[in-house]
Image (spheres, rainbow, N blue to C red):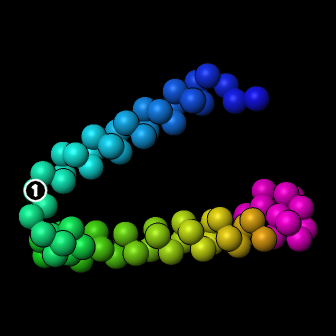
Amino acid sequence: MIAPCDIAIVCIYMAAIFLAGLYFGRHMKSTTDYFLASRAMPWYWIMVSVWTTNIGMVHGYLAHGGAAYNWGLVHCHME
């Protein structure tokens, strides 16, 4: 069963992401502004974004999910 505090945390998170999208979306004039951050983003933020996207999706969800399916949850807890 899902606890009410878990639902509240998810709702607060989704509202914060939505409000951040509205705030930062006001400055977007074209698709170049969206995809390239108006060419104003420093290299280290781009590096962190690529690294977290790669590690978060492939390593976290796919690799650990497959390992948990094959060898049980013990393997995922070890990681």
- Quarter of the image for residue 74 reads bottom right
Q: Residue furthest front?
A: 30
Q: In x, y percent, where is residue 4?
A: 61, 22
**Residue, x 90% and y 68% (percent of image)?**
71
Could you say which is closer to the camera, residue 45 or residue 20?
A: 20
Quarter location, residue 76: bottom right
| Magenta span | 67-79
Left or right of 28 in this view: 52: right
Q: Quadrant of the C terminus?
A: bottom right
Question: Between 69 and 41, which is closer to the camera in this rendering?
Answer: 69
> Neighbour class for label 1 at 10 Å: few (<14), some, many (≥20)?
few
**Identity of the residue drawn at 85% across and 57% down:** 73
Residue bearing the label numbered 1: 27
Tell me where residue 63 appears, x and y as whole percent.
70, 73
Q: Is residue 41 visible?
A: no
Residue 51: quarter of image: bottom left
Mark 1 is on which residue type?
His
Magenta run includes residue 4: no
- Image quarter where the N terminus lies is top right
- State the residue at coordinates (60%, 74%): 58
Residue 68 falls inside the magenta stretch: yes
